[in-house]
Image: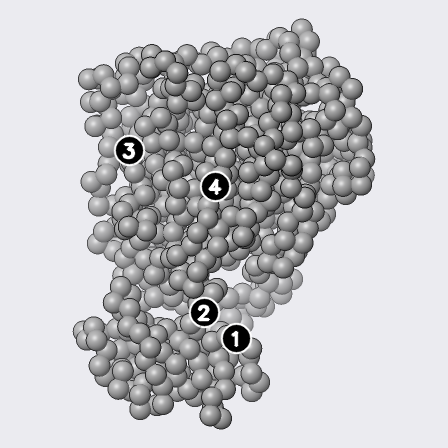
Amino acid sequence: MGFLTPFIVLIERRLLRPVVLLLAASLALVSGLGVHAGGQTKHRKLARDLEVAAASPMQPGHRWVRQHNGQRMVDALIVGEGADPEFRSLRRFIERIGGTVHARFASINALSVTVPSRSLKALDERDDVASVSPNRATRRAVSTLELVSGASSAAVRSYSGSSANYSGLDGSGIGIAVLDSGVMASHESFVNTAGARRVVRQVSLVGKASAAAAVSGFAPGSVERMAFESSITVNASLDYDPYGHGSHVAAVAAARRNNGPTDTAGVAPGASIIDVRVLASDGSGTVADLLAGIDWVIHNARNHNIRVMNLSLAASSTESWQTDPLARAVRSAAAAGITVVTAAGNFGQASGSTTYGTVGSPGLDPSVITVGSSHMQSTNARGDDTVNGFSSRGPTRGAMVDTNGVRYPDNLIKPDLVAPGNRIVAIGATSEAGAWNLLARTYPALVSGLGTQAVKRSAMLLSGTSVAAPVVSGAAAVLLQANPGLTPPMIKAILQYTAQPLPNASLVDQGAGMLNLEGAVRLARALRTDTLDRLAAGTLSAGTAINATALPLPQSTINGQTFAWSQFVIMAGRQVLAGSDLFTKWQPIYDPRLAWGGKTVRRQTVSYWPEPAGTAYHRYVPRSFSDGLATSGTLVTPGVRSITALAGASSKNGKTGVFMPSNTLAGWVGSGSGVPLASGVVLSEGVVLSEGVVLSEGVVLSEGVVLSEGVVLSEGVVLSEGVVLSETTAGTVRASSTPSPEGEL
């Protein structure tokens, strides 16, 4: 694959960016690169932190550097290059300079050594050395995503000294369907402990919408259905993901730590991956193919235990969640028991200003988990995290239109939560022959500066809500492993209730806050594991006990920082609810066949192909769906606390209503504020009387903060958001904005 141009780390100071870029470019020319005598460019081989440690006059304090017999020694990993796999010459050199060789790793052609720091420059100049990295045994075992999300906490999983060995929850047994541009199944990140591939099925629906529709009426296992399945199988492909986006997304959700150059482990490294290709090699496709892909996942969920579906998509739509075709499709998936996670979109800024009302479809649907992007500020600590400027904000602006042409916008609070989505390193897809994907070829900086790249160990850098979404998909898989009885609405509620609200970000900036997998796992484990089966058997009613143990203390400690949970959930896009009753009593709205948005509740009726008696409904193969208005019934039980009124009327300038900071509401909840609902929330004659937090159209027009004519997705706004869809089913699907290696400064 060749040597790649080193990536230049930029100083994150927005006002100094032009100067910094010029300075960085100049330094690259005069000092960042060496030159061979023959005039060819030579890349820097020493890791930056190793170089700093060697040059520092003081003891740096890393575990891999120490004083011994009056000289500074460093523990390092040397990746070799050349025809001698035993590295005899290199071994002799290390011994001559007073170093020690501890081990040779045949899988990555590397030596584990201890050498004097003064000899690092000499190692850098050797032709049989490809790279020299500090032996960061502990840090290399856990990826940045695992650290920041809480996946590496004791409640989820813990690592031994080896980068590949861990115990605890990893999503094993749960299938995650990734609808995207394909997945490089042969990458080392997608194997299990036995070396077997975890990409268990690969299909392509590109150009197959008509064929998919033609077999929709045939039963599972029929000759016609089996012929169709055979025609869309692409397991034998040697270029699994020519565009490169889908592999990165799948890796963020479920990559396993490999022997590559950087920490690329995902959130659920044991989960199975189902690759459903809906984009062509240039990142484009049709909405019809995407809908066919969703249908395929619903039909095949039983075969592969698909419990999670990831859609790193943002679609322009002026329609209400009730009628938008993509929203209806994902609502059917949720009704079938699949947790649908989708990106909010990357249109939170226009001309340098924050823009509201830019969440698209299917993220506008209340049944899905809509994910915005948080910025980790290049640290593993959570206390300094913020919401990315590019991350799309709510409220949703799709609308019902009456016969007189009057629009009635949904105005639902979205996103539901945020997750890391800035400068995320995951795998970079290549062909079997080692050719980079189209994104990497078009923007080489996406794969630069990530260490020595190799086929099946390659890495790439991307930013956007399309990267944040699979973080939550991986988290959902881990929760389902911990408690397989959770319904999709329960998973959303757990993730919101345990989220960490970020300062100075409102409900429509971040929803309930930033993903906290540590807390979510503890809460999920406190609940009964038979809830889904009891729902299928019809033995659940409003208020039935659903907790198995006492609920955990509502706080988490991650990377040394202790923080309180939000302790609230957002229901119907307008109701902000709190209280332990949310997780000690069955709330009817946890039935995935119900979708509640604003004052309206819709019910999905699912019919299934015949199956043996006694099988839980969520394991059947759906045959058809019907969607209609629900007319009556309890949605939320009495005793649940409402904090909706505390938010007040919506005003961007006043920071109230949907624009109220989430951490302010969380603080009030923690102090016991809120009003217990005497009668719960009841649907009567098709109308929910409690309307919740509402954004009036007067606020929209007077303050000018929300797009009044629906969601307008402009080109070139930010970073590789993934897929931007047109508004009609006859339109096209296309990857839009330019991917940026810098992320958001």
Residue underneath mark 2: 136
Q: Residue furthest front?
A: 549
Whichever of labels 2 and 3 marks the residue nearer the N terminus, that label is 2
* Dot placed on the residue nearer the N-terminal end, 2 or 4: 2
- Find residue 586 and report its horizontal and vertical position in percent: 62, 23
Q: Is residue 282 above or below residue 205?
A: below
Q: Nearer the viewer, mark 3 or mark 1?
A: 1
Q: Say which of 326 and 97 sits in front.
A: 97
Vertical relation: 719 (above or below) 63: above
Which residue of the protein is positioned furthest toward the bottom in this rendering? 70
Label 2 near label 1: C-beta < 8 Å?
yes
Alpha carbons under labels 2 and 3: distance apart: 39 Å
Does 349 appear above or below 435?
above
| Residue pointed to by mark 3 | 203
Q: Secondary structure at mark 3?
A: strand
- Circle 2 SS class: loop
* Alpha carbons under labels 1 and 2: distance apart: 9 Å
Q: Which residue is found at the position 39% from the left and 45% from the top?
A: 270
Question: Gap between marks 3 and 1, in whole Å?
Answer: 47 Å
Tell me, for residue 478, which label it has, or none: 4
Residue at screen point 52% across, 19% down? 535
Whether residue 265 is visible, yes or no, is: yes
Q: Say which quarter of the image contains residue 722.
A: top left
